[in-house]
């Protein structure tokens, strides 16, 4: 990982705070996006399964193709999960505008929705896979492998370091930031309005200013999350991978937000003390 030169005061602050902030997640990386400064990290270069964090890449590739977002997509038998046999509230035969399918894939992490986006990509699934590979190269995600669009396969792997790059890129897409920061939405399924919720319980919660969000879970990947948040005047990207439980992942995320806010206070106090000296 690229090391970032910090002042002695900040380095001492981060070292001390990191010691007081043990991660339950097995891999983690937190950066100040504006400066590129690494605030916290743990095993950030370990290659691990990433589950539904994959869907951020799927969404970017689909949007890059500039397809008609109003065009209808019918959920097909091919879209049914045969890897984990996960359930879906989107029945086979349902027809939705592509924009609603994208909403379901990102906000509620629906696997059939993500699969159908790849299946209906111009040129089909082979062209989709080629586009994903090209996007990984363009973003410099050299330690990432994505073989299918949902994240159900444990062969979809990456590092926290690579996923920070993906999060930063995804946050430049207006549709992705809007969708992943919706707490809920009503979507018409076969003529009936169905309410869907964001898989990230922090979205819409008081005290959280979230600009990008995506959760993930499989047995192999554990509980994962990517968030871009504003805290203490900073745009902070956090990647937390392979937590053993939702409560562990959530506790890590809350501790990160608290750390970022406390760090600003500590830095201000340090500077003030230097001026007095």
Image (cartoon, rainbow, N blue to C red):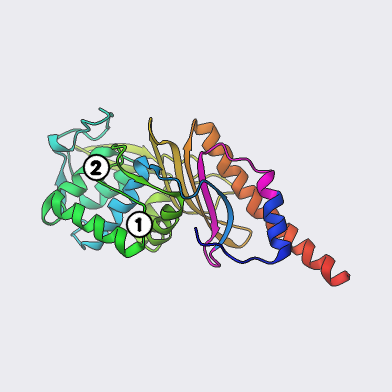
> Which residue does the image show at 39% across and 40% down from the upper left?
216
**Position of residue 86 measured from the top left corner of the image (x, y, whole percent):** 28, 29
195 relative to 121, above or below: above
In the drawing, what numbered circle is on residue 46? none
Residue 266 placement, left or right of 167: right
> Does residue 47 show up?
yes
CB under 8 Å between discs 2 and 1? no
**Position of residue 63 measured from the top left corner of the image (x, y, whole percent):** 26, 59
> Which residue does the image show at 15% across and 47% down from the upper left?
119
> Which residue does the image show at 62% across and 44% down from the upper left?
255
Residue at which label 1 appears: 142
User: Residue 22 in magenta?
Assistant: yes
Q: Nearer the viewer, residue 263 or 190?
A: 263
**Position of residue 102 measured from the top left corner of the image (x, y, whole percent):** 28, 49
Of circles 2 and 1, the one toward us is 1
Residue at which label 2 appears: 113
> Which residue does the image show at 28% across and 60% down from the upper left?
135
**Position of residue 80 measured from the top left corner of the image (x, y, whole percent):** 19, 33
Q: Secondary structure at mark 2?
A: helix
Q: CA distance from mark 2 to mark 1?
A: 27 Å
User: Residue 70 in magenta?
Assistant: no
> Does residue 108 show up?
no
Q: Which residues are magenta?
A: 17-36
Q: Secondary structure at mark 1?
A: loop
Disc 1 crowd, CA 10 A, few/some/many (<14, 14-19, 20+): few
Residue 51 placement, left or right of 236: left
Q: How many marks?
A: 2
245 relative to 120, above or below: above
Residue 179 placement, left or right of 123: right
Q: Disc 2 or 1, which lies upstream in sequence?
A: 2
Disc 2 crowd, CA 10 A, few/some/many (<14, 14-19, 20+): many
Q: Which quarter of the rendered picture does the C terminus lie within?
A: bottom right
């Amino acid at each position: 990982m690229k090391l970032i030169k910090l002042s002695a005061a900040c380095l001492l602050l981060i070292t001390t705070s990191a010691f007081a902030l043990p991660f339950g997640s097995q891999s983690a990386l937190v950066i100040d996006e504006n400066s590129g400064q690494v605030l916290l990290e743990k095993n950030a270069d370990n290659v691990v399964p990433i589950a539904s964090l994959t869907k951020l890449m799927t969404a970017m590739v689909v949007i890059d193709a500039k397809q008609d977002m109003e065009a209808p997509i019918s959920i097909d038998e091919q879209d049914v999960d045969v890897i984990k046999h996960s359930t879906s509230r989107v029945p086979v035969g349902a027809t939705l505008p592509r924009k609603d399918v994208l909403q379901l894939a990102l906000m509620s992490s629906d696997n059939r929705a993500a699969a159908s986006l790849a299946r209906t990509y111009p040129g089909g699934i082979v062209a989709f896979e080629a586009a994903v590979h090209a996007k990984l190269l363009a973003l410099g995600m050299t330690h990432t492998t994505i073989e299918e669009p949902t994240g159900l396969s444990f062969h979809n792997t990456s590092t926290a370091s690579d996923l920070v790059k993906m999060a930063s890129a995804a946050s430049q897409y207006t549709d992705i930031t809007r969708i992943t920061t919706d707490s809920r939405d009503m979507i018409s399924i076969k003529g009936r309005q169905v309410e869907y919720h964001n898989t990230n319980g922090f979205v819409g919660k008081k005290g959280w200013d979230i600009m990008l969000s995506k959760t993930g879970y499989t047995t192999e990947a554990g509980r994962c999350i990517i968030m871009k948040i504003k805290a203490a005047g900073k745009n902070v990207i956090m990647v937390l991978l392979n937590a053993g439980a939702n409560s562990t992942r959530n506790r890590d995320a809350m501790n990160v937000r608290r750390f970022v806010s406390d760090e600003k206070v500590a830095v201000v106090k340090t500077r003030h003390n230097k001026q007095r000296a």
